[in-house]
Amino acid sequence: MLSEKEIMNYAFKDILFHEEVLAKKYAELQKEVTDPHQIQKKFQGLEMAARTRYNVLSQKMNGLGIV
């Protein structure tokens, strides 16, 4: 049976992985868009939000001693 810390460790790492995937996906989609003003800005905003969530999660993990 997993300890509470092991469960949190796994959960945080899983969320962190998905945020990084989203940020990369938004960055790539941003490059493929032909409307340079509207859609690219939306993808840029989504990428920035994913990176912000990634950084917040990383800081929480460090505070909890999750490596």
Image (spheres, rainbow, N blue to C red):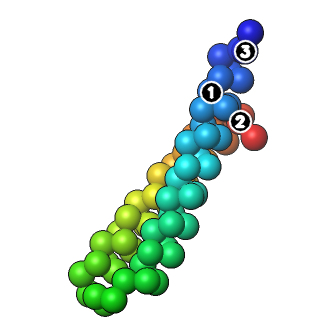
Who comes first in sequence, dot 3 or dot 1? 3
Q: CA distance from mark 2 to mark 3?
A: 15 Å
Amino acid at the residue labelled 2 = Ile
Residue at image mark 3: 2
* Foreground pick, 42 / 33: 33
Label 3 vs label 1, nearer the camera: 3
N-terminal of the pair, mark 2 or mark 1, is: 1
Residue at 51% in and 66% down: 25
| Element assignment for label 3 | loop
Crowding around mark 1 (Cα neighbors within 10 Å: few <14, some 14 to 19, many 20+) is some
Q: Callout 3: few (<14), some (14-19), or many (20+) C-alpha neighbours within 10 Å? A: few
Can you give x and y, in whole percent of width and height, for residue 9 in the image? 67, 31
Q: Residue furthest top?
A: 1
Residue 38 spot, x, y in % from top left = 24, 81
In this orientation, does residue 59 appear?
no
Q: Secondary structure at mark 2?
A: loop
Q: Which circle's residue, 2 or 3, is located before the other in the chain?
A: 3
State whether residue 66 is above or below residue 3. below
